[in-house]
Structure formats: structure tokens, C-alpha cells
């Protein structure tokens, strides 16, 4: 099958192109490189051994789309191309409506002319607006809080109407949560032009001193630490979801693509600092218009119907504390760290770094809460990290 990937040199697009090539699809890319780099094509070839046909240009250029479809025998389309920054969309709504809607309409018109009947659309969890409950299911009411999300919702409505008019089409709407990470070699990654819109590349650029400071928008949300909570799905899992959608989805299908777990902005920052042993300079600023407090997926449908494994890690770092004991010229540091094991496993098979770990104890959630409440082994809820842990374990997340 020959697949046209719009925005195929971008972050999600390039990872999806790699997965398509690994599954023996032929790929054609259209990209205007407004937020991507041409060198990505060489990286794709290095990773897959395959060349990809590129048409450099804009999806809003209908004559270019006509040229592609007349020459390339396109059998399916995966549509990534579009503006995607929530904050920018609030400031420049007309730009978002013009670009995201017109490009999609032109693409659908040309597909119809050339009898191309498979379409996978890159939608977003922003179509759920402010959810009344979590996790979010595909059946939840739809609304938006920003123009970016509104363009996604409007395109979804267009696709539903098109399917009503012609049910021979296979249209898949994939509602992404927050993509993160890169393929295992690190060759491909998220490297946007200019100032990053997504959190992780911004954290990286602050850590490497390319940017001065990370602004965290709001710490007064009703969340575990006051900062926004999002569902961070690995970009390779997201890419695999597109391949499975091409293979399995029939008719009009809608799927959430997320892990089913929510993490706060501060959790992500602190985890980055801990893992990389580096300080990230950040400041708390006011809430950003168009943002919501919490957003994470119910991914049951994608797992059951597409066979996509979207589980979060089975072992997750929750909280830690450090105690320092000074005797003469000797400084001893002792670290207490707490991890959550999210399924039944044989703990005797967990491998430990003996030079770094002196002792491991396993407790149930109830036992931990009891120990904190009763100040066992210095784990008092008056101490910051353990009070935080108590709040986490008592929350609906766990």
C-alpha cells in the first residue's frame, strides 16, 4: 500500500514513517518544513534502509496535491500537517482556522477525485475540552477551550459528515494525548524550529542552557502539586497506532491514544532532574489561556480493537527524601525512595544495583499509609515528601 503522509518530516510524522516502512508500506511525504528539517529524511533512511519520496510544499497548495495524486497512486493518507500550539492559537485564531481547515478540505477533495478511501486523522485530546471526569473515554461529550482544539473538532465533524455521505470510506480519528520520547537509537527526536511548544524539548533546551528558563503555567490547579496533569504517551507507541489503524480499522473509527496515567508538569521536571543529575531552571507564572487542569485517557478501546499496547510502566518512581549525617570529616547521605509496582510481579526477580541500593522493603499501599500516619521509621506526614506520597496514594489515580 502506498501511503501519503502529510507533515511526514515532523516529530510524530517521522516516527510514523519509520514504522510504516518497517511494515513494508511505501511512503510519500509532503512537508513544507515550517516546523521540521529536511535532514530528517537521511535519518529515516539510516534507520530503515529505505528512501522516501518527498514533495516539498504546503498541503494548502491544491495544485501540488493534484500533482502528487496524479503521479503516485496514493491508496491511503495519514494527515499530520497543521499548526498545533494551544497558546499561539489563542493569539492567532484566524491563522489556525485558515491553515488547518483549508489544508484538510483540499486534501479530502483531491482524495475523493482520485478514489482514495483510507484516511487517518491526527486529532487531539483537546476536543474533550474540560472533562467532567477522568479517565477520558471516546464517548465523552466534545467541546474545546482554544482555537487549536476547535480546528481539530471541526475537522472531526467534517469527517463524520463525509462518512455519512459515503460509508465505503475507512476513516480513523486518533485522539492523541501528549507525545514524548524518541525511537531507541535517539537519531530521531523532537527538534522543533524556534521556541518549542511541547514541554520535554523545552526542558531539554533549558537544561542545556539554550534557553534561560522554563515557565510553568499555573500551580493553583486542583491537582496533586497544583500544576497541570497530562497523559504522556511514547511517540513510538503513537506511531504504531497509525500502522494498526491502517491495517485494522474499518468504517468510521475513533480511538484515544494515551497511556491511561496522568503526570504533572512538576513531576516531569523533577524526574528529568533526578535521572540526568542536572538542575532545570524554572519559574511559576500565571495560567495559560486555553489550558485545563487534568487530562488522561481511557485507552481500553485502542487496546482491545487495535491490539495496541499502551500500558504505562509497571514500576514508577513516586517520591524520595534525603538525610545527611555529618561525623567529623565524613558526610553520609542516605536516600529514601518510594516506587509503585502497578501489577502483581515476583519481587524476588527484580534486579538491584547492589553498589547503590543497601536495602529494599516491599509494602502494600495500606501499610505505607499506616506507617506514614503513625510515624514509623521517620516517615511522618509532616515531612514534605511523605506528605506528598500520602496525598498521591489517597488520590483516585492509585
Image: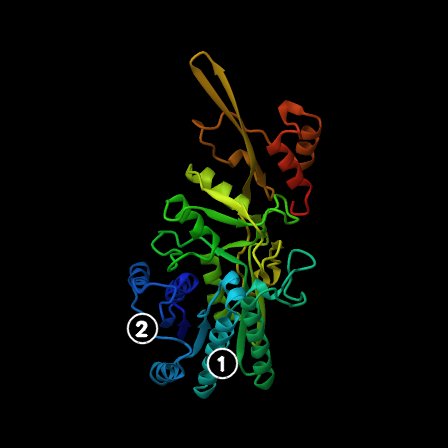
Q: Which residue is found at the position 45% from the left and 39% from the top?
A: 275
**Is residue 337 in sight in this rendering?**
no
Measure the C-alpha gap from mark 1 to mark 2.
23 Å
Question: Does residue 69 appear left or right of residue 238 in this picture?
Answer: left
Question: Does residue 349 appear left or right of residue 222 in this picture?
Answer: left
Query: If the image is split into quadrants, where does the C terminus sit?
Result: top right
Q: Which residue is found at the position 56% from the left and 68% from the top?
A: 147
Q: What x and y, as percent, mark residue 19?
A: 41, 63
Q: Which residue is found at the position 63% from the left and 49% from the top?
A: 221
What is the quadrant of residue 125 in the picture? bottom right
Task: Identify the residue under disc 2.
Answer: 53
| Residue at the limit of the structure toward the bottom, as seen here | 113
What is the quadrant of residue 249 in the picture? bottom right
Q: What x and y, as percent, mark residue 246?
A: 48, 71
Task: Identify the residue under disc 1.
Answer: 105
Secondary structure state at the residue bearing disc 1: helix
**Is residue 251 in sight in this rendering?**
yes
Counting residues from the start of the chain, the first of labels 1 and 2 encountered is 2
Asked if labels 2 and 1 touch by Cβ distance under 8 angstroms, the answer is no
Q: What x and y, as percent, mark residue 309?
A: 53, 56
Amino acid at each position: 500500500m502506498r501511503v501519503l503522509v502529510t507533515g511526514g518530516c515532523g516529530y510524530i510524522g517521522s516516527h510514523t514513517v519509520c514504522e510504516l516502512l518497517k511494515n513494508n508500506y511505501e511512503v510519500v511525504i509532503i512537508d513544507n518544513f515550517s516546523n521540521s528539517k529536511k535532514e530528517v529524511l537521511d535519518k529515516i533512511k539510516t534507520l530503515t534502509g529505505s528512501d522516501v519520496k518527498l514533495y516539498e510544499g504546503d498541503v494548502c497548495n491544491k495544485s501540488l496535491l493534484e500533482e502528487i495524486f496524479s503521479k503516485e497512486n496514493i491508496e491511503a493518507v495519514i494527515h499530520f500537517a497543521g499548526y498545533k500550539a494551544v497558546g499561539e492559537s489563542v493569539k492567532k485564531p484566524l491563522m489556525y482556522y485558515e491553515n488547518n481547515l483549508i489544508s484538510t478540505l483540499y486534501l479530502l477533495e483531491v482524495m475523493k477525485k482520485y478514489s482514495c478511501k483510507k484516511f487517518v486523522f491526527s486529532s487531539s485530546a483537546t476536543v474533550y475540552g474540560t472533562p467532567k471526569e477522568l479517565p477520558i473515554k471516546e464517548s465523552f461529550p466534545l467541546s474545546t477551550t482554544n482555537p487549536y482544539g476547535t480546528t481539530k473538532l471541526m475537522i472531526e465533524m467534517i469527517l463524520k459528515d463525509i462518512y455519512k455521505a459515503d460509508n465505503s470510506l475507512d476513516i480513523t480519528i486518533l485522539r492523541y494525548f501528549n507525545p514524548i520520547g524518541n525511537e531507541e537509537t535517539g537519531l530521531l527526536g523532537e527538534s522543533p524550529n524556534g521556541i518549542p511548544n511541547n514541554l520535554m524539548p523545552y526542558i531539554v533546551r533549558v537544561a542545556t542552557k539554550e534557553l534561560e528558563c522554563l515557565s510553568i503555567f499555573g500551580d493553583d490547579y486542583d491537582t496533586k502539586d497544583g500544576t497541570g496533569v497530562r497523559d504522556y504517551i511514547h511517540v513510538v507507541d503513537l506511531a504504531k497506532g497509525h500502522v494498526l489503524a491502517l491495517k485494522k480499522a474499518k468504517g468510521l473509527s475513533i480511538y484515544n491514544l494515551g497511556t491511561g496515567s496522568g503526570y504533572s508538569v512538576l513531576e516531569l521536571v523533577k524526574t528529568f532532574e533526578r535521572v540526568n543529575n542536572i538542575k532545570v531552571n524554572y519559574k511559576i507564572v500565571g495560567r495559560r489561556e486555553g489550558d485545563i487542569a487534568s487530562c488522561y485517557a481511557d485507552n481500553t478501546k485502542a487496546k482491545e480493537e487495535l491490539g495496541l499496547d499502551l500500558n504505562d510502566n509497571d514500576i514508577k518512581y513516586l517520591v524520595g527524601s534525603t538525610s545527611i549525617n555529618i561525623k567529623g570529616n565524613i558526610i553520609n547521605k542516605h536516600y529514601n525512595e518510594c516506587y509503585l509496582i502497578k501489577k502483581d510481579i515476583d519481587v524476588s526477580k527484580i534486579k538491584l544495583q547492589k553498589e547503590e541500593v543497601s536495602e529494599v522493603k516491599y509494602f502494600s499501599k495500606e501499610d505505607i499509609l499506616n506507617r506514614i500516619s503513625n510515624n514509623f521509621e521517620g516517615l511522618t506526614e509532616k515531612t514534605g515528601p511523605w506528605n506528598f506520597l500520602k496525598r498521591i496514594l489517597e488520590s483516585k489515580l492509585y
